Amino acid sequence: MIRKFVTAVLRLWIVPVVLVGWEVVTRNWAHPFFPPPTTILPHMRDLWFDGPASRLWLNETALANFPPSLGRLLTGWVLSGVIGVTLGLAIGRSPLLFRFVDPIIQFGRALPPVALLPMFMAIFSIGAKMQISMIAFGIVWPVLFNAADGGRTVDPLHLETARVFRLSRAQRLLRVILPSALPKIFAGLRLSLSLALILMVIAELFSTNGLGYQLRLAERVFDPPGMWGAVILLGVLGYLFNLIFVLAERRVLAWHSSARHRT
Amino acid sequence: MRLNPRRALDSPLVCGTLGVVILLCVAEAAGRVGIVPTVQFPLASTILVEAAKLAADPSFLADIATTFTGWALGLLVTVLIAVPLGLLLGSVPPIERALRPLIEFLRPIPSVALIPLAAWVIVDPTQMKVTMIVYASMWPVLINTVYGLRDVDPVAKETLRTFGFGPLSVLLRVSLPSTAPFIATGVRVAAAIALILTISTELLAGGSGGMGSFIILAESSPAGVTLTVAATFWAGMLGLVTNGAFVLAERRAFRWHTAKTGAAQ
């Protein structure tokens, strides 16, 4: 256990090396656009993290900007997940329906989601409704596509078995089709989560709060350390989201990989 | 000869066309009947007419050309950087192990967050665009190359080694060809990301021309929503065409591979 931990830490030796290298290079270069990390980190603390410990050190600015951003991102993601899985499984199980909507899905998937921003701004005007609907519409396609693919490739033997045991339609859906499509659905959800973060930033650039707004603000008042701070914060957020998702996926799909090893 | 309705419903082309037509008709009817306000959601027919007009508009065509050139250039530079780097990381495991945490930290940074920063540092719009595309779309190519190299048949490599080929020949004659399908998949994914980044930079960093700036300018024009949606439609078509071209090229180039694994994608 301890040995495992030590090797894991040792594997990260590159991180301090890069940080020190970054510090040395930017300090010697002294370019206004490339502040050293020792300037960026205190600046981030002043901007967001000088609150009381009881609130996880978050200050007023952080509390005014982080929760709305995360709320929009997660609402959009959950919404697109529910819609994508429901429609995707229906499309995957019905070859006829699939043939009808395939071109529409292909188009939606190919449409660069950022190009939707002006359209959504024009339709909904700026606000949470526009941001959430833009995030959800932009990221629903990978989920939809993967759920349809998963629904289509259910093992026929499993379906036959379910029929022999006279499982009802609902039982078949929940016990056979959904579990067997789950690995692909998770792949789609993971992709859409990272896309959701990008769309959240884009949608918020033109709003009055949130992380995207903070980024825009730093650009407007010409504050390079603030800009780097926002980028680092978004990077950490993306990393954490991915980490949590992978851990959850491993738990939920534990039966799947073990089942695969046995057969 | 009579058209068999049963048969017609088996054809993806017939069904697909019907699906699109039905969707457009429903949208049109909803607007005409008044279920959705036409000020916010223009009629499908209005948008289609506008889109057709745009296709004949030389300034819009020039914008498409700008976007396409930026996208192609960015993708080319991405491949030229990411494939050799992937080959290096994949064939020298210690380097890969050392750089992995760094890659894991850099990859999730939402690339659009870097656009304002890049707009300060790099003045030339094309250079800026290419830089952003390379940053965002190199990851799938890099990672697919590394994974593909891991999947190379060890017997084939050993065989060549037995015949006295050096490591470079083994790389070029066995590893690279058998990794090529993986690289191609990575490039296809990268192509979609590159298009997102091309349009994002055009949207956010003004003055560079291209479809992104056209769309953002269209929003504040009198034709407003209609023009925006029509231009967005063409952005989708560009995505569809570029993706389709990659899928087709992959299918042609790697027929041997899909035949071997029986995977049809």
Image (cartoon, coloured by chain):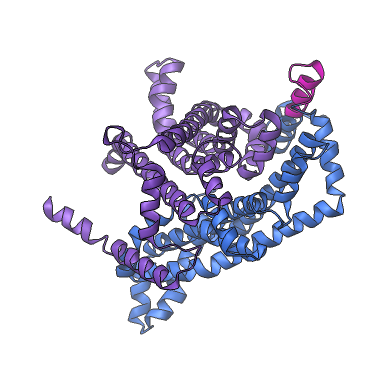
Q: Position of residue A199 (x, y in %)?
A: 55, 41
In the displayed structure, does residue B244 sit left or right of residue B175?
Answer: right
The residue nearer to you, when weighing A218 against A101, is A218
From what the image shows, is residue A132 above or below residue A106?
Answer: above
Q: Which chain is blue in the rendering? A: B
Q: Position of residue B200 (x, y in %)?
A: 62, 50
- Does residue A263 show up magenta in the picture? no
Q: Which chain is purple in the rendering? A: A
Q: Position of residue A130 (x, y in %)?
A: 61, 30
From what the image shows, is residue B40 above or below residue A195?
Answer: above
The residue nearer to you, when weighing A189 against B227, is B227
Q: Quadrant of residue B124?
A: bottom right
What type of secondary structure mainly makes up the magenta span? helix
| Residue visible at 49% across and 52% down in the picture | A227
Q: Quadrant of residue B119?
A: bottom right
Whether residue B69 is visible, yes or no, is yes
Report the span colored magenta: B22-39
Whether residue A236 is visible, yes or no, is no
